[in-house]
Image (spheres, rainbow, N blue to C red):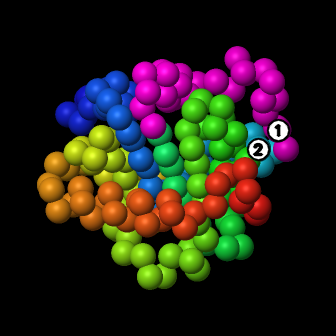
Amino acid sequence: MRSSIPTFGELLADTRESAVHLEMRDDYGSNPRLEAWRRGQRVDWNDRESWWHPFHQTISDAVSRGVSIRRARVVSEPVSEYIRWEHYSTEANIIAGEEVRWLPRSQATDVLLPANDFWLFDGNLLRVHHFAGDGSHVTDELSTDTETLKLCGQAFEAVWQRAIPHSEYRI
């Protein structure tokens, strides 16, 4: 059964100026790429065909249209194994055209953060992600509530201003 919520690709295709993503979990469950990394497999970043996925093309297409795409991650330190892998695999996001920054959770104590990860498209449409305790994705919801948009936009910008660019963040 297809969800009534548009896919990420559909939402990004309608985006004209900006898409920002705030991630705040230290674990998002397992996936085949994480498991391969755990087994010692590493990506040959020069062999784009081996790792480029439709997600990366969607990002690249949006950036080519002039959409600014920024991702900020609030992480506990020392980082979890999942975050260690995510830091490694972020190279794909960067190549696709995203800007990515990392904020140690200890530096976010005085920042008001929403309880859930989200994407905010053009400042007027919010896609909220809901996860189970084990990090597995449960569902998404959309919101256009003015106060929620404002809160999430301000939270993202507060994190972004403090966060460390990916190329400088060491784990």
Q: Which residue does the image show at 67% across and 65% down from the upper left?
A: 80
Q: Does residue 9 lie above or below 143 as drawn?
A: above
Q: Give the range drawn in magenta.
A: 40-68
Residue at 45% from the left image edge and 37% from the top image edge: 68
Residue closest to the eye, 128 or 169: 169
Q: What residue type is labelled 2?
A: Trp
| Residue 79 seen in the current view | yes
Name the residue tied to disc 2: 37
Residue named by callout 1: 41
Identify which residue is drawn at 44% across, 82% down: 110
Q: Where is residue 44 in the image (x, y as percent from the top left)?
A: 82, 29
Q: Is residue 25 visible?
A: no
Q: Which residue lies furthest to the left in this view?
A: 145
* Residue 70, horizontal then vertical, whole percent: 49, 45
Q: Position of residue 8 (x, y in %)?
A: 37, 34
User: Which corner quadrant of the image does residue 83 belong to?
Assistant: bottom right
Please report contact status of discs 2 and 1: CB closer than 8 Å, yes or no: yes
Marker disc for residue 109: none
Q: Mark 1 Cα within 10 Å, few/some/many (few <14, many 20+)?
A: few
Q: In which quarter of the image is the N terminus?
A: top left
- The quarter of the picture where residue 49 lies is top right
Residue 16 included in the magenta stretch of the image = no
> Residue 129: x percent and y percent?
36, 52
Is residue 52 inside the magenta stretch? Answer: yes
Q: Which residue is drawn at 82% across and 38% down?
A: 41
Above or below residue 76? Residue 83 is above
Whole-Å distance between the Cαs marked 2 and 1? 5 Å
Badge 2 marks a residue whose secondary structure is: helix
Q: Residues within 10 Å of mark 2 (few under 14, many from 20)?
A: some
- Identify which amino acid the numbered label 1 is placed on: Gln
Q: Which of 143 and 102 is in front in this view?
A: 102
